[in-house]
Image (cartoon, rainbow, N blue to C red):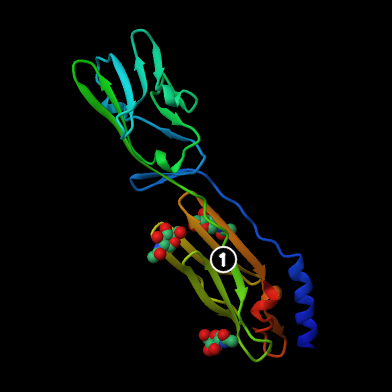
Amino acid sequence: MDVQFMCAMMVSRLLLSYALLIYNTGFSAGDIVYVETGASVQLNIQREKLPAELDDIMWKNERSQNLVKYLIKSNDVKPHSTYIDRVDFNTETFSLTLKNMQKIDSGIYRAIASSENDINIAEHKVSVIDAVKAPVLTVNSIWSITEPCNFTCTADNLTIINYYSTSCSDEVKSSGIYNLNLKCTDDFIICNYSNPVSWKIDTKTLQQLCAFNPDDNRWWGCLKSEALT
Ligand SMILES: *[C@@H]1O[C@H](CO)[C@@H](O)[C@H](O)[C@H]1NC(C)=O
Ligand SMILES: *[C@@H]1O[C@H](CO)[C@@H](O)[C@H](O)[C@H]1NC(C)=O
Ligand SMILES: *[C@@H]1O[C@H](CO)[C@@H](O)[C@H](O)[C@H]1NC(C)=O
């Protein structure tokens, strides 16, 4: 089979190449509640800590602002003036929903139930972070069917270098809460970059990155990396 012809076909397929960008928002990992910038977060109380006698419930942030004050007898909800459009308080569950979270909103949130004494009924460490940037999957083989199909999966400061012959080994690299995950199937190479609030992938078919040699049933190098960018 003509390798040059196969490679030329791959270049045209690359023009149709796509990157799937999918992400989820907001969930907790360990003690920290991670929230994507701009998203909402719901903070719940620990019901078992509620005292029998209860006058009011207050949600506070680290800056001593009372985000919401709920006076039980009068069923009166008082949001902080600077949070009026951004908080929802549920008078049944006493949970607090904060909307349009920004990085400056990161910090510790507490709920306090008061009667004769103050009782801490919730404490959440909230961290607002951006969605990850898309990773990039590039081939770094030379134009040759005798060179391995080497490729690089990279995002921010993480890089995975690997190659495909009859398969490739899955690999993960981490930096704090950021993970770069390489996965290979019989047809695809998937580069997946994630943090607790989001993930994005760059996925390419083997035909886009490598050349198949039917004589030995292996995938070999094909395009120069420049051809992919
Ligand atoms: C491809 O990877 C193999 C194995 O890691 C290495 O020996 C070779 O030098 C690499 N070739 C290129 C062109 O990067
Ligand atoms: C790597 O990048 C992430 C995301 O931008 C950053 O949070 C982290 O501090 C960086 N790590 C190093 C070692 O530079
Ligand atoms: C990418 O990684 C995230 C986090 O591990 C995972 O939830 C998601 O399903 C992965 N996506 C794909 C397409 O494998």
- Residue depicted at 64% across the width and 86% down the height: 142
Image position of 142 with respect to 114: above or below: below
Q: Quadrant of residue 5?
A: bottom right
Instruction: Residue at 41% x, 56% y: name it.
Output: 177
Residue 206 appears left or right of 38? right
Horizontal relation, residue 50 to residue 18: left or right: left
Residue at 50% from the left image edge and 35% from the top image edge: 100
Q: Mark 1 is on which residue type?
A: Cys
Quarter of the image holding residue 103?
top left
Q: Residue at x 60, y 86 (%)?
A: 148
Q: Which residue is mark 1?
A: 191
126 left or right, relative to 150: left
Disc 1 on helix, strand or loop?
strand
Q: Image quarter for residue 74? A: top left
In the image, residue 19 above or below residue 94: below
Q: Nearer the viewer, residue 19 or 156?
A: 156
Where is residue 151 shown, x and y percent of the image? 58, 77
x then y, percent, for residue 23: 56, 50
Residue 21 picture location, percent across and down: 62, 54
Pick out the residue farthest to the front: 82
Image quarter for ligand 1 equals bottom right
- Point out the residue furthest to the left here: 116
- Could you say where residue 168 lies in the image, as x and y percent from the top left? 56, 76
Image quadrant holding the N terminus, namely: bottom right
Q: Where is the C terminus found, in terms of image quarters?
A: bottom right
Q: Is residue 101 left or right of residue 176?
A: right
Bin the neighbour count of mark 1 within 10 Å (Cα to Cα): few under 14, some 14-19, many 20 and up: many
In this view of the protein, which residue sits in the foreground, 48 or 28?
A: 28
